[in-house]
Image (cartoon, grey):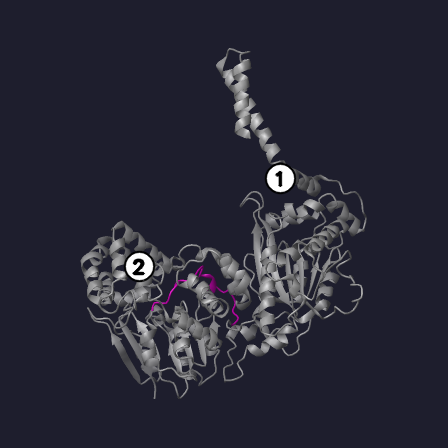
Amino acid sequence: MIPLILISIYIIQLQTKLFDVSSDPTVQSLALYILYGSVSVAMLCILAWDKIYLSLKFMYSCFFKPLGNHGNDQQSRLEAFYQDQAKIYDNTRGALLRGRKTMLKMCAAQLREQISTGAMGRNPIWVDLGGGTGWNIETMNEYFPIDRFSKIILVDLTPSLCNIARERFEKKGWKNVTVLCQDASTFLVPGLEDALEGRVGLVTVSYALSMMDHYFPVVDRIQSLLSQEGIVGVVDFYVSGRSSAPAEKWSPQKDRQCNWFTRHFWYMWFELDHINLNPGRRDYLEYKFGTIKSLNRRNHFIIPYMIQMPYYVWMGCSKTRQNEMVNFIDVSDDTDSVTSAQSIRTSVSNSNVSNVSSSSVSPVSFTFQNKQWRLDYNPTLPCHTQFRSYIYAFTWEDPRVDLEYLNLKKDDVMFVITSAGDNALEYALKGQPKRIHCVDMNPCQNHLLELKLAGITALDYQEFWRMFGDGNHPHFSNLLHDILSPHLSSYAFQYWSYHSDRFNHKFYKTGYSGLALTILEWLIKMQGLSKDVNAMTSATTIEEQKSIWDTKIRPAIFSPMLQKILHNPMFMWNALGVPINQMNMFLKECTPQEYIENTLDPIPAHSLFSQDQYFYYLCLKQQYSRNSCPSYLTREGFNKLKTSGALNSFKLHTESILDALMSLPDNYLTKLVVMDHMDWFDPESHDELDDEIKANEKNVTERWSGLIWRSAGTKPWYNELFLKHGFVNIEALGIRRPGMAIDRVNMYASFYRATKP
């Protein structure tokens, strides 16, 4: 239409010589621009009038319309505010009220999980407080069918919004939904005056708690309504206090604190509309209920990054649920007390878990999780905050060789370093030991293993393969909220919510190790080696594979530029995860160039990239193939882990190896795999390593068959420490020589085992 209008104006101008009143070409051009611009703006306004009208009415109703004096009558004040915008409410709140879908997805996923495990009845009751127009209920139908609720009760104090809700549900034909125009703290359902107390499976409150004058009675009413297995979902605006919130002592609260301007500006801004963002309100909610999940976000409303409107998404439960869940912290079928040093020190020292009441200090959020893989830790400690991401997106040790020497049995109790979790999953799959304690100081490494455990538990094989085989899942955010969230600790869920883009492109190029893969990919492209790499990774014979390496790829990779890169300690740490002490170990025996040559040269002759050598296949292709991948990524391995109960063996410690060992009972461990971490210690200052080896000696049982490790040096300096502390036999299981590979990775110069009498 606009082009036709502009053409018409142009024809009229030609016929009438409209702009000939002035002979000045500049004036004529200016007049022409004004006319065309005015007509264009007018036509755009006509065509987009519906959207413009909604925006204008929204701004008038929210910011300019006088509400009058309603005294203490909150209902009349709310009605004056909403009556003119009730019909346009849903169309104007999408950008302002963020997080509602996230909250509903989390609640739906939690309901499905609890129903599937028998922890909740198949047809729960849902109460939506401050439900307004019923948008929450209609949207929830996409995630959890409305007919699966035995009854749904929408409570709101505003008549005009309740009328919209009734019309909506009548059109949908939902007979199990009741709309009550009553106060949230005192509402009664006709015919069910006292029948709801302690029976409600789900209570949700979306951007309503902050608007309720009588806030504390509402929270108390939610507590009385909720069943022992019930859950509460809340999304709302907030501002933090000047100091840390009490809940930060027992649940993850990333980005909860607001800066001075944000705290004061939004508090005063919302106060103009009788919305109370006093931090004590949210504190009271978290005090009365156990925290299952918590997210703190910023709504960049209208102007990204300039406007940062704080809001939170929170899911909680009755504290009485802890009496049931605390039994799962300790494992009853063995001597494993598994309470990490921080976990029970934090929760039990502050509250008596055998006598939990609504007035007791809130226990740690780990107590309320569906899965008890993760043990509690303090994320504010410097030893954890130094890590912004995981270092390793994939594990860089060959588990096949480990399994040859470990000789795992079903009653074994293992102690391993987490890394990316690939080897721990291999041990669980092939050996199915009774317990696998995975330890890592970097919380993000445990977040990654938790995600893999949750994925195997909840996803089908194809979805899991897309995430960790292809390394690319464009709908990961939906999977996280819809399926995975009930199986993740609040810490891991929060981390992956903030980093859901990791699976948008190439997952294995993320983390610190991703820098090395990125540089390798760039080097391959710059050297024009892409076709040769594809040929080598698809070769069907060792001879063909080795020929391509020797004649095409090796000469291009071992360049002077690579030598300079490998001599840079910052690159060695940030890209390859090699700390300076470990680098110094191999520099005493060879140059970085020689070390890399001794690592890579034997690999093409060892096994096929296309069928077995998945470590270097991943480095070259940034993804796995169906024929070249870790066992847990095969369909057979995935299904076995999913159905055999092997995942129940995992306990994830986020602490130092020494602290983890000290938290475990004496004479408990039977197998230890500590990878290369002892290389990280300084030969001149190693008191912690001394204590660690002492703890190893104390923790192992008579059935213990050894501790295995790898090193960048052929004769690690710390071998003598094992002899000092009673380990009589230090056995070299593999020493790397030029041209010979000790395993499929061949990255380490030696592979050792220590035993005692």
Q: Residue at x 55, y 30 (%)?
A: 1
Among the 4 quarters of the image, the one containing residue 543: bottom left
Horizontal relation, residue 237 to residue 162: left or right: left
The image position of residue 719, as x and y in percent, is: 30, 77
Q: Which mark is residue 620?
A: 2
Q: Of helix, strand and loop, which mostly describes the magenta segment?
A: loop
Determine whether 233 is above or below 370 in the image. above
Which numbered disc flags the more N-terminal residue, 2 or 1? 1
Determine whether 93 is above or below 111 in the image. above
Q: Is residue 351 visible?
A: no
The image position of residue 571, as x and y in percent, is: 33, 57
Q: Is residue 513 visible?
A: yes
Find the magenta span and give its range: 375-396
| 193 in magenta | no
The image position of residue 667, as x and y in percent, is: 44, 86
The image position of residue 190, as x and y in percent, is: 80, 63
Q: Amino acid at mark 2?
A: Leu
Which is more toward the observer, 726 or 89? 89
Q: Which residue is mark 1?
A: 51
Q: CA distance from mark 2 to mark 1?
A: 50 Å
Among the 4 quarters of the image, the one containing residue 544: bottom left
- Secondary structure, mark 2, is helix
Q: What quarter of the picture does the C terminus occupy?
A: bottom left
